[in-house]
């Protein structure tokens, strides 16, 4: 959600799927999580091999992170075309953003 500066935070707000893509690091090298999966894979070497449970937990968490990030990017891409498609509109964009919220926070 991107809001213009005014007294009421709900007036002038526009839900933008591009913000999701920015945050997840799929738009630019400047994005907060750009190539986070590759960094996390390199960090996996720091997990002691003697503790198989920790290594397995890290690997599972990394797999879930990559899966959710890719799904979120897919939903954001689809919703970015929500207004351009016939029968589309801001409600279609909001629908996919809400689906992503449900996916990430369930």
Image (cartoon, rainbow, N blue to C red):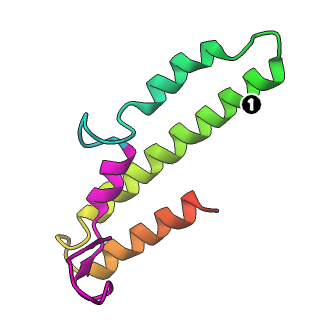
**On screen, residue 28 above or below 98:** above
| Image position, residue 103 (x, y; %) | 56, 60
Instruction: Specify whether 46 is left or right of 84.
Output: right
Name the element at disc 1: helix
Give the quarter of the figure containing the C terminus.
bottom right
Instruction: Specify whether 48 is left or right of 26.
Output: right
Determine which residue is flagged by label 1.
57
Question: Can residue 80 be seen here?
Answer: yes
Farthest residue to the top: give it: 50
Instruction: Specify whether 89 is left or right of 95.
Output: left
Quadrant of the image occupied by residue 15: bottom left
Instruction: Specify whether 40 is left or right of 60.
Output: left
Farthest residue to the left: give it: 84
The residue depicted at 74 percent of the width and 31 percent of the height is 57
The residue depicted at 36 percent of the width and 41 percent of the height is 32
Q: How many marks?
A: 1
The residue depicted at 20 percent of the width and 78 percent of the height is 5
| Image position, residue 105 (x, y; %) | 60, 61
Question: Per the image, is 45 magenta?
Answer: no
| Image position, residue 49 (x, y; %) | 76, 10
Bin the neighbour count of mark 1 within 10 Å (Cα to Cα): few under 14, some 14-19, many 20 and up.
Answer: few
**On screen, residue 5 above or below 26:** below
Quadrant of the image occupied by residue 11: bottom left
Question: As rendered, which of 30 and 26 lies closer to the eye?
Answer: 30
Give the quarter of the figure containing the N terminus.
bottom left
**On screen, residue 59 above or below 85:** above
Question: As rendered, which of 60 and 1 lies closer to the eye?
Answer: 1
Question: As rendered, which of 36 and 82 lies closer to the eye?
Answer: 36
Farthest residue to the front: give it: 7
Which portion, as a residue range, is magenta?
1-24
Question: Can residue 88 be seen here?
Answer: no
């Amino acid at each position: 959600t991107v809001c213009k500066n005014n007294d009421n935070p709900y007036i002038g707000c526009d839900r933008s799927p591009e913000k999701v893509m920015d945050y997840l690091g799929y738009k630019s090298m400047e994005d907060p999580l750009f190539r986070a999966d590759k960094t996390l894979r390199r960090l996996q070497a720091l997990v002691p091999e003697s503790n198989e449970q920790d290594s397995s937990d890290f690997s599972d968490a990394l797999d879930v992170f990559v899966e959710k990030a890719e799904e979120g990017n897919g939903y954001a891409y689809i919703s970015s075309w929500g207004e351009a498609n016939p029968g589309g509109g801001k409600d279609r964009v909001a629908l996919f953003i809400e689906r992503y919220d449900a996916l990430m926070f369930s």
